[in-house]
Image: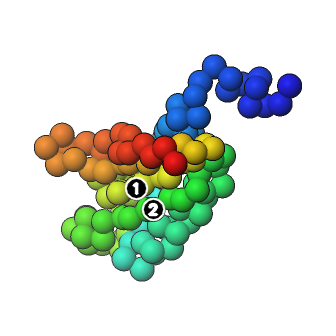
Amino acid sequence: MNLEEKYFSNISFRERAIFEGGISMAALFHQYIGTPVNEKTVKNLEIAISDSIQLQPAIEMADVSIDLNRIKQANTEFNYVSLSGDMLDVKIYSKINDSLAIIRMEFIEELNYPLMYVEEIIEE
């Protein structure tokens, strides 16, 4: 019995794509919130987050954008701030067989919250 049969036979490829994307988004959020960042390091941090998330199972791509304006507004006398959820806009593309799940996190002003949700499912 292979791993697919043993652990994932009770869900569809679509459900598994959503699961893998959701797990990766939660890992990203809880791993990187609080990371020191400033105007000079923001691009490197975006790349590091994207590259690390793409190592996860089923993750084909991760688009990570950190809001530079929020960094500039929050900047302190120490020339850096701690990364927070309101600074992140992330799309994770998770694919299992022919099911692609696009999982999104973005700061929703009216909720005052960095919301994670399933943005789109594509069946190829």
Farthest residue to the bottom: give it: 40
- Residue 53 as seen in the image, left or right of residue 121: right
Query: Badge 1: few (under 14), some or many (20 or more) residues near its Cα, within 10 Å?
Result: many
Classify 27 as above or below 14: below
Report the front residue among 39 and 62: 62
In this figure, which residue is indicated by the disc labeled 1? 90
Colour option used: rainbow
**How far across and down, in percent of the image, does residue 111 sit?**
18, 40
Residue drawn at x 77%, y 23% is 6
Farthest residue to the front: give it: 124
Report if the CB atoms under discs 1 and 2 are less than 8 Å apart: yes
Q: Quadrant of residue 96?
A: top right
- Residue 101 as seen in the image, left or right of residue 78: right
First in sequence, mark 1 or 2: give its number.
2
Secondary structure category for the residue under label 2: strand
Report the quarter where the N terminus lies. top right
Secondary structure category for the residue under label 1: strand
**How far across and down, in percent of the image, does residue 82 sit?**
39, 58
Is residue 49 visible to the viewer in this orientation of the structure? no
Farthest residue to the top: give it: 10
The mark found on residue 63 in the picture is: 2
Residue drawn at x 17%, y 48% is 109
The mark found on residue 123 in the picture is: none
Tell me the kind of residue under disc 1: Val
Classify 46 as above or below 24: below
Residue drawn at x 78%, y 31% is 3
Query: Badge 2: few (under 14), some or many (20 or more) residues near its Cα, within 10 Å?
Result: some
Tell me the kind of residue under disc 2: Asp
Report the front residue among 59 and 122: 122
